[in-house]
Amino acid sequence: MSFFKKLFGGGSSTSAEPQGDKVMGEEAYKGFLIKAIEMKAGSELQLAGTIEKEIGGDLKTYRFIRADRMNSREDLVALALSKGRQIIDEQGDHIFR
């Protein structure tokens, strides 16, 4: 994994989402599954999610975390799913490399 992916909250693995992640919402998009996950930052929620896709029989997972924080669960889910769609549109399967 590159230095920049680590620095900016990206990464890939071949396992499913890490244990303990609470999925707050999910959406299928262009063959990928985007999940908004709960990440508490004090009394607020921080934008975080995963993007999953089965490639060659293996489930690949990309985790993203952004600096955005908010109190509204609904707003956070909408923003996380939107960010997931943006990442897919920009990078496609390359997020798993």
Image (cartoon, grey):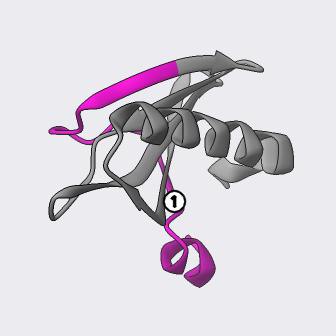
Residue plotted at (28% across, 42% down): 38
Residue 12 is covered by the magenta coloring: yes
- Magenta range: 1-26
Q: Nearer the viewer, residue 53 or 66?
A: 66
Say if residue 93 shows up in the picture.
Answer: no
The residue at which mark 1 appears reads as: 11
Nearest the viewer among 80 and 21 is 80
The residue positioned 77% from the left and 20% from the top of the image is 30
Q: Is residue 80 visible?
A: yes
- Residue 37 horizontal/vertical position (percent): 35, 38
Residue 35, how many percent across, how many down? 46, 30
Q: Amino acid at mark 1?
A: Gly
Q: Quadrant of the N terminus?
A: bottom right
Q: Relative to 74, is 72 above or below?
A: below
Instruction: Please tell me whether residue 25 belongs to the stretch shown in magenta.
Output: yes
Q: Is residue 30 left or right of residue 33?
A: right
Front residue of this view, candidates 59 and 34? 34
**Front residue of this view, candidates 48 and 62:** 48
Quarter of the image with the C terminus in it = bottom right
- Identify the image quadrant of residue 85: top right
User: Which residue is located at x 42 percent, y 30 percent?
Assistant: 74
Relative vertical location of residue 13 with respect to residue 6 in this rendering, above or below: above
